[in-house]
Image (cartoon, rainbow, N blue to C red):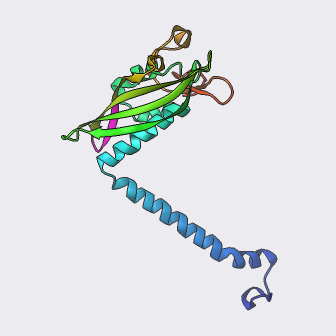
Amino acid sequence: MGISPDVAHCTLAEALWHRRFPVVATACLLMLNCFGASGCLAGSLSPIQRLHHHAHDLNESVRWGQAATVASHVAPAYVAEFLAQHIGWGSELQLAEGGVRSIRVDPSGIRARVKVDFAWYRLSDMRLRRTSLEQTWQREGSSFVLVEQVFGAGDRGLLQVSEAATKDRPAAGATGASREGPGVVALSAPGQDGAQ
């Protein structure tokens, strides 16, 4: 393999730069195109498309204990109650799997019903249970936020707040995450783990 005339009399660093410049430049252009396209796409989503995105994002975030993401999809007036429903998740019970089963938007486009299924188990007995939840989402501006979540079918224990889970915890109403054992993250109020 011969050396091209343009790099024949340069340092090793210069030669490597000339040789790799097309790869680096192409990678930079691809990244700019991807970021630009994703920004354009995010701005052009309809409220219904945002609802689908937010419903899936919220329920995945709940599953993995990402309280900051959860709070961004819940109506401010409902955050405290929502966190209280989930306070034992990660410490007393663990979600095995879960996901959105259906999304139905009312004809006015203002409210939507989202059905979510979870498979879960209590850490005390490790018996797999199934629960369906029904969520009500309401349009606010160009997006939707969760305003209510109720039991749908299956085992009612998923949304029950136990005394053990709430003992020695600050009042619900704020967000944060705390580690509850190896690899398990629970939703909790700030100050529980020293982070906001």
Q: Quadrant of residue 41?
A: bottom left
Q: Residue furthest bottom?
A: 5
Q: Where is residue 9 in the image (x, y as percent from the top left)?
A: 80, 87
Q: Where is residue 16 in the image (x, y as percent from the top left)?
A: 75, 75
Q: Residue furthest left?
A: 108
Q: Which of these two is toward me, 185 or 99?
A: 99
Asked if residue 141 lies in the magenta stretch, the reply is yes
Is the magenta region chiefly helix, strand or loop? strand
Q: Can I make out residue 66 in this image?
A: no
* Residue 88 appears left or right of 133: right
Per the rendered image, the range of residues in magenta is 140-146
Which quadrant would the C terminus be assigned to in this image? top right
Residue drawn at x 48%, y 22% is: 86
Q: Which of these two is toward me, 36 or 138?
A: 138
Q: Which of these two is toward me, 29 or 91?
A: 91
Asked if residue 180 lies in the magenta stretch, the reply is no
Q: Position of residue 140 (x, y in %)?
A: 28, 38
* Residue 180 appears left or right of 136: right
Which quadrant would the N terminus be assigned to in this image? bottom right
Residue drawn at x 57%, y 67% is: 28
Q: Can I make out residue 170 in this image?
A: yes
Residue drawn at x 48%, y 66% is: 33
Q: Determine whether 151 is above or below 48 in the image.
A: above
Residue drawn at x 63%, y 23% is: 180
